[in-house]
Amino acid sequence: MKPSGDPWTASGMKDFNKPHEAGVRAFLQALVHDPRTHAKFLNMLSMLEHMGSRKIMVSQMKRPEEMDQDTLQHLAEEARHAYFFKRHAERVNGSAMKGWVDENTMTRVPALMYFGRMDAGISKQVGERDAYGWVSLIIELRACWLYAIYNEVVEEAGVHLPLKGLLAEEDHHLAEMFEMCGENYDLLKELSRYETGLFVKLWSALEEAYSSHVDSAKAA
């Protein structure tokens, strides 16, 4: 059954994140003017998109009879998003950034923990069989929320980062996942609140890392 309403209202996501929006925006406004650190942030996003594509692949390999064109398209687009962020990370950096290691990926370990805990927590709540849809729905809510702010920041700053096409694909994925997961709005709000707590911890790690970078630069 196609759910009524929209995923933003149903999840309460924007309400949960309203207290954090100004801080996220301010962080990004500072970050985009620091090319080296910005490149590491982009590489972190590449890593997270890669993890998302891998989640789709692994979960659907357990249910090969249900693999369809929409799922394959979702997988392909998430992999392409990982490539998009890697390509722009290297452009901003001015040199190659192979893999995702501490030296070239901002808050690599906290980012891994964020994704791993979100995946495990949601999978435990909904069960492995339904985890693909619910994890994807929560990820798409976060991606659309964050990338919309990011797009506004880079456009205002005159920084070249063409996020509009990627955002359109994420919006499409969000609509698909919302339709897949049905009308259990209470569960959706619970999972969105859970993810917001994990995101806040990740963002605090990012802010701490950037603050340390700025302090080191001033000391030098």
Image (cartoon, rainbow, N blue to C red):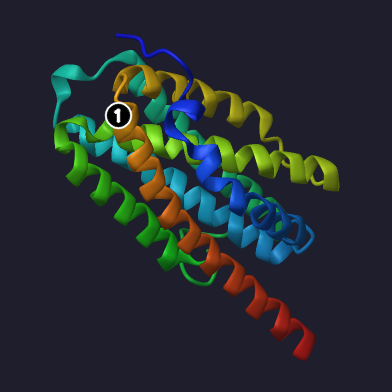
Residue 178: percent from left, percent from top: 39, 22
Q: Nearer the viewer, residue 153 or 162?
A: 153
* Residue 130, picture quadrant: top left
**Horizontal side, residue 83 vs residue 189: left or right:** right
Q: Read off the residue under disc 1.
A: 133
Query: Which residue is farthest top?
Result: 1
Q: Nearer the viewer, residue 7 or 218?
A: 7
Q: Secondary structure at mark 1?
A: helix
In the displayed structure, would residue 66 be above or below residue 48? above
Residue 31: percent from left, percent from top: 72, 60
At a point 75% along the width and 56% down the height, the residue shown is 32
At a point 36% along the width and 17% down the height, the residue shown is 179
At a point 50% along the width and 45% down the height, the residue shown is 16
Q: Nearer the viewer, residue 26 or 39?
A: 26
Amino acid carrying label 1: it is Gly
Quarter of the figure that contains the N terminus? top left
Residue 220 in sight: no
Residue 185: percent from left, percent from top: 34, 27
